[in-house]
Structure formats: C-alpha cells, structure tokens
Amino acid sequence: MSDSAVEVSVVLPAYNEAATIETTVRTTLDTLGGFLPEGSYEVVVAEDGCEDETPAIADRLAAADDRVQHFHSDERLGRGGALNAAFADARGDTLVYFDTDMATDMRHLEELVESVRSGEYDVATGSRWMPDNTADRPAKRGVPSRGFNLSVRTLLRSGLRDHQCGFKAFSREAFESLVDDVEDEHWFWDTEMLVRAQRRGFRVKEFAVDWEPKGDSKVDLVRDVFGMGSQILRCFWEFSVSPYANRRTGMVVGTLLSIAAFALMFVYIDVDAFVDAVSNADPALVGAGAAVYLLSWPLRGLRYRDILSELGYREGVGFLTGAVFISQTGNLVIPARAGDAIRAYVVKARRSVPYTTGFASLAVERVFDLLTITVLAGSVLVALAAFSPSTLAELAATASGQGLAGQESRAVQQAVVVASVVGALAIASVVAIVWSARSDSNYVRRVVNWASDDSYTELVASVFESFVGDIQQVAGDGPAFARIGASSVLIWTIDVATALLVFLAFGLDLSLVSLLAVGFFAVSVGNLAKVIPGPPGGIGIYEAAFAAIVSTLLPVAFGTAVGVAIVDHIVKNLVTVAGGAASMMSLNVSLTEAVDGTERDLDAETPSAED
C-alpha cells in the first residue's frame, strides 16, 4: 500500500511528443478531476530518452503543478521498459496508462480507472475489437492487428479480443506480481502482461472503447515481425511446451524425428521406382558408396571447427561432427533448412557459443557449400563449351524440357532455373561478404534504421551487427578463407564419389572421364536445385536435375538415370539419419531442448565427443 494520499497514477509514455504532450497532460488532469477527489491522483510523464523538447516541457509542467511528475530516462527503454520504471516510481495503488495521442476517447477513462480502483478487477483494458465499439481501423493496420490477436488467442490461450490497445489499468498488487516475469520491454509488454495476468488468475476486465487512430499506422517490419512475432513464439514455448521438455521426451522426439526423416524419403519418391532401382544395383557397391559418403562427415566437423576457430571458439572435431549430423537430420524433416537452428542450439548449450555466432558460422558454411558446387558445375560447363559445343547444345535443349514428358519437363525446367539463380546468388554473396569485410562502414545499422525507428530497432540492429560481423571476420582472413574453401571442395568431391559408386553399382559401362564430368555436374546442379524450400530433404527436384543431365550427357535412359539418382539420394539420407540418431544419443541432446534453448551444463552429465 502506498504511503501517500495519491490513489491513482496515470503514466503517459512519451517519446518525442513535444507537439502534443502539454495538451495531453492538461486533458488528463481535467478528466481525472471530473470523477476523483482532489489530491488523489497524479499524472506521470514517462519521458523515454526523447530527442526533442519533451523533457523541457515535462519539467515545466511538473514545476507548475504538483499533480504532474516527470520521470526521465537518458536512454531509450522501450515502451514497456519506460512503463515498468515509471509505475515502480509512481505513488498510486491504481496504475493506469494510455497512449499520449489519446486515440481512445477520454470518456472511457473513468470506467478504466474505477474498474480497478473499486477492487472489482485487478486489470482492466480497453478493446477496439468488441462488437459494440467504434474503431476506425485502417485496413493496413487492421488486418495485421486481427492476425496478431488471433495468434495470441490461439497460441497463448488468451480469452481477450484486443491485447495491444494502449488503454490499461493495473492494481499495484497485480503489477508487482507480474512485472518480474514479463521479459519484453517494448511493444509486446502489454500483451505479455495481459496473458500472464489471466494465467495467474487475476480478474481481467475487457471493455469496448471508441477509438480513432491519430499516430503511426504503418506496418513496421522490425516491430511487427522480428519483435512481436518472436515474442509470441517465446511465450508459447514457455507456457505450452517447456514444462514438458525433458531428456526423456526429448529423446523420444529425436527418435521420432529420425523415423520421420526415413519415412519422408518414400513420400516424395515413387516406392516402386525405388524397389526397381535397388533390385538393379549391386548391393556391395551401394554399400561402398555409403561408406565413402560417411568419410565426408568428419571433414564437415573439421571445416566447422575452422569456421568457429576464426570466431574465437576452439572445439573438438568429434563434438562438432555430431552437431552437424543432428542439424542435417533435422533438415531432412523440417523444410527450408530450419533444422540448422538445432545446431545453433547445440553449440550454444554445450559450448556457450552465442546464437548470433552460431547462425553466422552456419551462414559461412552454407555460402562455401553453394560457392563450391557452383564452381564445380561451372567448370564442367566451361569445359563442355570449349571441347564439345554440340553436347552443350543438347544440354540446353534438355534444360528447356525438350524430349521429356510433361511432368518431367516441368521438374527439369524448375531445377535449371533454381540452380542458375542459387548459383548466381552464391557468387554474389561471396563477393559482397569479402567486399564488406574490407569496409569500415556500418551498413547493417543503416538498413535497420531506414526500415524502422521503433524501440525494437536497437535490439534488432545489435543482433544483426553481431551476426554480420562474425561473417566478415571469417571472410577477412585470407588463409582461413582458403582453408575452408579447400575442405569444402574435398567434402563435395566425396559426395560426387558416392554418386559414381552408385553409377558403377548399376553396371553402367562408361569411361572414367565421362563419369567424373557428369558426376560433378549432375550432383552440383542437383544440390543447387534443391536449395529452394520444398519437400523436406529436397527429394524430387534433385532427382529431376540429376537424371536430366545424366541422360543427356551419357548413353543412359532417363528411367535408369532416375534410378541412380534415387539410390544416391537415399544412401546419403540414410547415412545422415543414422549419424543423427547416434549423435543425439552420444551427445545427450534432445530436440525439445534444442528448440527450448535451455542453457544448462550438459557436459556435467555426459562427456563430450572429442576428436
């Protein structure tokens, strides 16, 4: 209980509000005076690191009227941070805030205040989305707002219609009970307070208000996507998943993931075609291909060690090979290579590598992979242009879909387009990374500041700066760049060797030169083609590109080429799944923990797999 006569504290969060803050303060005082006893209320200007005349105006108002207080911050705290600090400093037991543009009709202020002051409710909030209110909501903000509120109701199980209306009141008891658990200090603060209040059993009142937009109504990428969207997912994990995430359930999920990865291989390909292909192949050579492919994985761990070493983290090859295995298994199930996030978790939880560095190291690895296979494919293409123009013409005809059935033609054309675009982007990315590594200009912050001036900007900019800085650090070291590139070439050479052994398993009588040329070209283009998000594992488009190239450049029927591609891809995926399952067991890494991002000392439970 406050030790002052003040019962109600109205906080006005203000950032660069010099044009309106005085009018807002005076209107607020007049409105409060209409239903509250004199001396029982105060108005606090929570000035959040303003860059205009707002601080001076707030000082003048506070000096002239003892009902006005000025809470100043030299730095941007964000709306939630400013409210937390101002509420903690306020004297009232009923804590109220609303946006300084007074978009909500002030005739609703009495109902907002009295709902909590009377003791009937612990929290009260205005709503623009109840049937009996008036809210002139522009479509460009109304649609995202409805989507946001639907997501909160669905994922966070809230019973409210509108979580972001800037018109709320809390009892001091409710505020102090909730504030330490609310993590967001920006725009999501409102939503998190309301959701946690409901989960704690506080009495929450939502009532219709008349509302007219007066401020910014634009969709802000930083605020609405990086800020609000990520916070919904954070709370969903904390409320609905994390309580059930433990080693036992994690290992079950990991096992199911491995099974799903295996099963999906036969969802996106014709099972009969696979059986026919395997029946025509020499099992000993297919097994030899699997053994050769397995050799590439320690090299992947070695390359990842070199990348992390450039960023200041020295880890064992065995551990990192296991981490790569786990993330690649996830990629077979989760589209768009989202399984890579699992590796970022593994190195964070087991070796305290920051998430920004984890994702930056993954980005470097991906760029090297794409650059390598682009160069390999391009080298073969240049050789064909120089020594066999007629063959190059045949390849161009095949790329346009000539001589193929309708479905096959479309798949091949898609593969060619995707591979060409991805290859060009890979080369452009390397050029941009190397060039930016030699520049002192901070382009990241310029771009983020151009995209948004929201209070999330500083947080988002710092994350992206750390990410880009790590990438540039690797690119700026010439010997390391060359060493990582050389290991990438070796890794993909082994990938091609696996495909060549599968060729031999089908009993194809071809010259070694032909096999090498076609193998490097077909495998490279096939892998470039499957980069674009599609079926998990990329099964389908890889076979199309691979078979089209093989059947054009070699005396091999299209059906046989498809069989080779299917067996090649299945062999590689089986090695990946087996390695991923074994690594999850040996490293004591559960996939529920991987998504949760729990930072605990797993090394104390299970010894590391060192080299």
Image: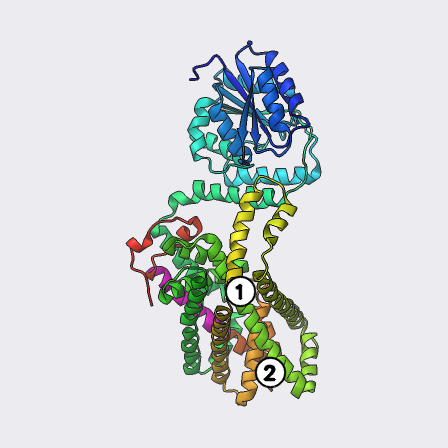
Report the mark closest to the observer, 1 or 2. Answer: 1
Give how far apart the Cα atoms at labels 1 and 2 are: 44 Å
What residue would you read off at disc 1? 475
Task: Sort mark 1 into few (<14), some (14-19) or many (20+) by Cα contacts within 10 Å.
Answer: many
Residue 100 visible in image: yes
Q: Position of residue 263 (x, y in %)?
A: 46, 64
Rendered-image quadrant of the C terminus: bottom left
Q: Quick check: is 400 in the magenta stretch?
A: no
Q: Quick check: is 575 in the magenta stretch?
A: yes
The residue closer to the viewer here, 575 or 437, is 437
Most extreme residue toward the top, as rendered? 37
Q: Position of residue 424 (x, y in %)?
A: 64, 68
Q: Position of residue 411 (x, y in %)?
A: 64, 69
Name above or below for residue 592 compared with residue 235: below
The residue closer to the viewer here, 14 or 349, is 14
Asked which quadrant contains residue 418, the reply is bottom right
Which label's residue is closer to the chain start, 1 or 2? 1
Dominant secondary structure, magenta: helix
Display colour scheme: rainbow
Q: Position of residue 34 (x, y in %)?
A: 61, 11
Residue 159 visible in image: no
Name above or below for residue 402 compared with residue 15: below
Query: What amino acid is found at the position of numbered circle 1 in the picture?
Result: Ala
**Left or right: 302 with respect to 159?**
left
The residue closer to the viewer here, 273 or 28, is 28
**Left or right: 312 with respect to 451?**
left
Rendered-image quadrant of the N terminus: top left
Q: Are marks 1 and 2 in contact (CB under 8 Å)?
A: no
Disc marking residue 557? 2
Question: Which secondary structure, mark 1?
Answer: helix
Query: What amino acid is found at the position of numbered circle 2 in the picture?
Result: Ala
What stretch of residues is rendered in magenta? Answer: 568-585
